[in-house]
Image (tube, grey):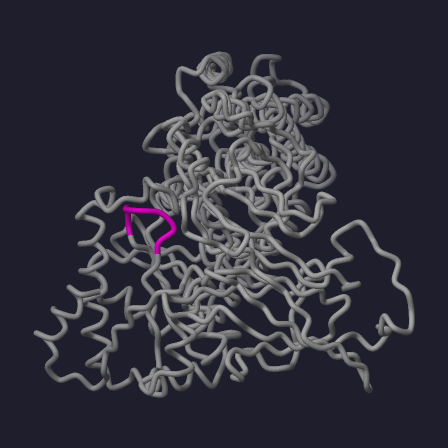
Amino acid sequence: MLELARGISQWAHGFKNGVIFVFNTGEEEGLNGAHSFITQHPWSRAIRFVIDLEAMGIGGKSSLFQGGSAPWAIETFAKVAKYPSGQIIAQDLFLSGAVKSATDLQVYQEVAGLSGLDFAYSDATAVYHTKNDKLKLLKPGSLQHLGENMLAFLLHTARSSRFQKEAEVEREGGTGQTQAIYFDVLGKYMVVYTQRFASMLHNSVILQSLLIWITSLLMGGYPGAISFGLSCLSIVLMWIFSLSLTILVAFIIPLMSTSPVPYIAYPWLVIGLFGAPAILGALTGQHVGFFFLKKYLRHVYKKRVPRLSHNVQENLIEWEAERWLFKSGFIQWLILLVVGNFFKVGSSFLALIWLVSPAFAYGLMEATLSPSRLPKQLKIITLILGLAMPVLVSAGMIIRLVGTIIGVFARFERSPGSAPDWLGSLIVAIFSAAVVCLMLVYLLSYIHLSGAKGLVIFAMCTLLALTLTAVSSGIFPAFTEDISRAVNVVHVVDATGRYGNQDPASFVSLFSATPGKLTKEVENLKNEEFACGKNKTLDFVTFTVNYGCWSSKDSNNGWSKLDIPELHVESDSMSDIRKTRVLIDTKLATRWSLAVNREEISDFTFEVDSEELVPSGHKSMVDGWHIIQFSGGKNSPTKFHLNLFWSTNTIHPSQKAYKQAEDTASLLLKLRTDVNMVTPKVERVLQKLPHWCSLFGKSTSPYTLAFLTALPVQF
């Protein structure tokens, strides 16, 4: 951004619009910096458009991954950028909730109603928020890629007389049919068009496809309809067999490897672990469908051309069956196009390309207008012409998407131990099977008559066996010093009383957002007396540790009881509704998380020094709790007031005795304060941890010293 500012200052001739560079912190603590700027800064009223530079990894291309509601901006970027990069499939995944994250752009969109573009690096996702997220990993070419694209875009936009008009129209008109569809081709050219045009194009292709299929089936008569049904069966069998084999491998991996996700450090292992069984399953399922097709076509050809020799007839049957397998690929892509078009999914362009290009090649090279004409073997040129464009457009996107998915598993579990160990591999297995069944269906249809089927099966079995052996033997470790396992080591002082003691419980907790047990890690922590399991659930307010390790040995040093935060009830009155005023004293902590029981509390206000920070009004709820996260600087206040307004069905304790519950539902408030301090016990643990472990830091993660306290409903 500094280099862009320098460049723009030198070329700022004929600008009709200003460019403001906002450097802000507080993104990890809840997008606070962006919120502060757009709600409080005097320049915020002049903002018409936002560009957010993000990262969910380090290095690679800086790609556009959000911004579909501003077609004019994306069209401009595609036109002037030297190396335009962006895929709307990333936006679809982000907006669907599959990616549990948010960026500063969300604040500008939701609070100020602005449109904008979001760019991010996504290579080496596994090192994100760990010690290995180092500047030296950011290659100069990545910065150059972002800089050249962004400088050209900013200069062009700043000089544009249409900019303010387009931004205002977009701000007032909403999204709807103005949503943009965009994707790049090899990072050299970007295709951009609107959702309105996409709907028209998709509807046209769908109607023409249905018309061609209906006409073809009517001309083919009853035999054609049965062959069509059997080709559909081959698709179903292909998916069933492919999914079955890959899912089986996903369940086997945790039993064979020390990690349920042993491919994080070496993502190419996924080719052998899941790609090979996916191809085996798809080929097997398609072969079963091929067998039934040939069996039926023998009856058809005996009646249709009874005078042909047996060998000639068998060749015709095999060629006809091969053609039906090839055309079955049209069916599944047509279904995806119909569904995607109905729900206005931006990445439906993939279904369009994978349907139209092979269908056009088949129609050009293979199709006949007369059903009485005998079939011929499919030409290789048909496959090349049909797959050239789809592979060119989608291959790089799929490779990057697989890399991102695998990298995310380094921090997959927000609440450690909440998901089964095999879940991560199951996701990769399903994704791999889907890619194979969708994108290799045309290629696989050629294999049955090519004589290479046995070789392909042998190669895939060998590849699967070799990768399973490599994973189980540890030849390729799941984690390395550069691609490490994300762990947290936290000295916990628990004053909630959940262990039945009036005195606070002190212990060191070790847990990981990466799936898998911590057995290997604990082996290195000799003499620290760590116990691991799921029998000690730890509530950190923003998340819960369902599986972890803990040790109470030598844990009473490095902290003081005077640092334990307090939740003090100053008043509790009953008029029309019950109102309780609570003093929150976080002591030395300026970073904390508070949960309010929304099943008991209908509303609340939050104050500091008589200034209202959170007014009354609608409050969100997740699993019965509303969570407040706070992070301040050195001079941040540490005393706050919380005014609680109870639900109307709540009765004052003076009028009714409460039955004390034993679960967390009996708590009214939960508070965690974070202190950036390393106690002697934590320091020893950090020194003894294996080199493949790295502390993980996110907005919801505690520091190395955390205090827990709570206020029960029956206080």
Residue 220 versus residue 666 in the image, above or below: above
Front residue of this view, candidates 29 and 522: 522
Report the front residue among 96 and 294.
Answer: 96
Relative image position of residue 268 (x, y in whole percent): 39, 28
State the residue in front, 492 or 158.
Answer: 492
In front of the other: 357 or 352: 352
Q: Quadrant of the C terminus?
A: bottom right
Asked if one can make out residue 406 in the rendered structure from this viewpoint, the answer is no
Q: Is residue 605 magenta?
A: no
Say if residue 599 shows up in the picture.
yes
Residue 481 vs 340, above or below: the answer is: above
Residue at figure coordinates x 20%, y 74% from the top left:
156
Q: How many marks?
A: 0
Where residue 299 sits, quadrant-wise, is top right
Extent of the magenta region: 55-61
Q: Residue at x 59, y 45 (%)?
A: 415
Query: Quick one: which residue is furthest to the right in this view?
Result: 656
Q: Quadrant of the N terminus?
A: bottom left
Q: Name the residue rendered at 18%, 48% in the picture.
A: 141
Query: Is residue 606 rendered to the left or right of residue 171?
Result: right
Outermost residue toward the left?
A: 10
Look at the magenta stretch and give its main secondary structure: loop
Q: Position of residue 490 (x, y in %)?
A: 50, 42
Q: Is residue 341 above or below residue 540?
A: below
**Residue 440 image offset from top left, x and y in percent:** 49, 33
- State whether residue 194 is above or below residue 133: below
- Percent across and percent down for residue 71 are 39, 72
Name the residue at 28% across, 67% down. 77
Q: Quadrant of residue 47 in the image?
A: bottom left
Residue 25 figure quarter: bottom left
